[in-house]
Image (cartoon, rainbow, N blue to C red):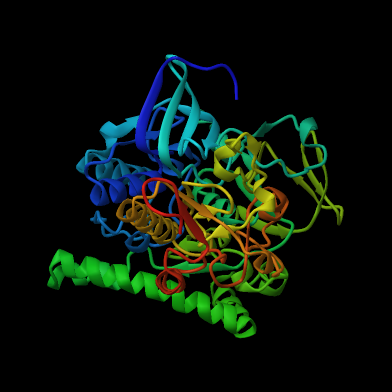
Amino acid sequence: MGDTQENTNIYDVLVIGAGISGIDAAYRLKSAFPDSSYTLLESRCVLGGTWSFWQYPGFRSDSYMSGYAFPWYKWTEVRGIADGDAIWRYVDEAARSQGIDKKIKYSHRVVGASWSTAAALWTLIVDTPQGQQLFKANFVFNCSGYYDYETPFESPIPGLERFKGTVAVPQFWPQDLDYSGKKMIIIGSGATAITLLPSLAQKAGHITMLQRSPSYVLSVTAIRPIDRIGRKFLPETAVRFISYWTTLFTEVIFLGFLSNFPSAGKKLIMKLMAKQLPDDIHVDKHFNPSYNPFEQRLCMCPDGDFFKALRKPHVEIMTDFIDTVTPEGIRTKDGTFIEADIIVPATGLKINPVGGVPLEVDGKLVELGNRFTWRGCMVEGVSNAGVVLGYFSNSWTPGADCGVQQLVRVIKRMKKTGTTVVTPYMAPDEKDQDAQPFFDTNATYMVAARPRMPQVHKQGTWSGRRNWLRDCIGDWWNGIEKGLKYTGGKAKDT
């Protein structure tokens, strides 16, 4: 994997990424193993991951912070749907409160990872400000997320290169862009488009949301009654407790309802959307997705800000395919021409499993698309490595924390038995079961990434993570022995 570097750093555990998953992993590690050494390798010059990266207008959470926040560090703001800056400050404050910020090595990009079974050691090749270095550890937590920070998803938009105006990609939003009074087109119907529209509508002269296919949009209160009223009569700890558990169980119950009763769920959501739309926007045309609600993440808008924006005279929504982009705007398949000064392609993310880091096991490259995941947090055949990902359909953090705590239990078992290597393995008959994608969603950009993502089973040891309650029960029921082989060290092979 390249020339050998002289500068070698050895730790018990290496954490890749200092976003919300990486900070949570660091907290769980330091709490469970206070005598073990660890460090976080962060490719950027700041912690926070998503929340320090995205800068487009209106950027915010799309789930309640009472569930999204760390379970070990309270979210003190009353507003449940928070803006990106507030969340970044919270993550930064949480890291500092535990001294985790001092364990982060910034501008350290992992470009290769190699496992040696004989040495029971991972060797990471890392680009640093001081040049390329080697970092070694017995265990690695990959907390780098699931999308590419440097390259956006390239949705085919015919003729976009001919446009004479500004193309503002949300992932790299130009901070000096003045869109006051300008004619704008947002291409897309996902969470980014739903978030952008109300914010851009405040200054834009005219704005059109052009979608190929509709999404479900659910209006929620930005400040929930328990957070607004409860704080007046209850202690802060009681409000936090009630709010946290209410959020988790509400998500589980609602997703369960949508999954088991898709027709009723769709009817309910469409009825709620129809009530908030102006008379000239028909729910059946613009908000009637071809998929069931649970098949893609629901878009949330705080206090109905998205629907309020659609009532403004200079805001419209169109559902049609793009024929071509011209120098002055977009022509749709039905012949409609939309003039624009600025086009905003909010068409998804480029999925980048394990941060795009090439993985080698005993000199052989690991093809993730051919592997299964153990309990959604380890990869078949890859020893001493955790892949920490949150929920796609629910709040992210409970899923990430669930995975981290499962990995901590595995390491505790290794320490207790004196083993040095743990490897997920599948019995031949298990491989014959029907494989499913890791992220069970039919979003275009996710479907495009399936060949590069690990696979899962619908249930059992090799199932992915779907919701907090199911995963907690599954982790307890399946334990930390089924599907894992513990070897090495002074103990006997098990």
User: Which residue occupies the foreground of this view, 204 or 87?
Assistant: 87
x%, y% of residue 213?
Answer: 72, 61
Question: What residue is shown at x 78% (from left), y 58% (from top)?
Answer: 320
In the drawing, does residue 419 fall left or right of residue 370?
Answer: left
In the drawing, does residue 180 fall left or right of residue 490?
Answer: right
The image quarter in which residue 40 lies: top left
Question: What residue is shown at x 67% (from left), y 45% (from top)?
Answer: 367
Residue 347 in sight:
no
Question: What residue is shown at x 72% (from left), y 68% (from top)?
Answer: 432
The image quarter in which residue 426 lies: bottom right
User: Which residue occupies the foreground of this view, 431 or 74?
Assistant: 431
Residue 122 in sight:
yes
x%, y% of residue 378?
Answer: 51, 53
Q: Is residue 411 above or below residue 170?
A: below
x%, y% of residue 3?
Answer: 57, 16
Question: What residue is shown at x 46% (from left), y 43% (from top)?
Answer: 50
Q: Is residue 491 above or below residue 246?
A: above
x%, y% of residue 278?
Answer: 59, 69
Q: Is residue 314 above or below residue 251?
A: above
User: Which residue occupies the foreground of this view, 8 or 40?
Assistant: 8
Image quadrant containing the N terminus:
top right
Image quadrant containing the C terminus:
bottom left
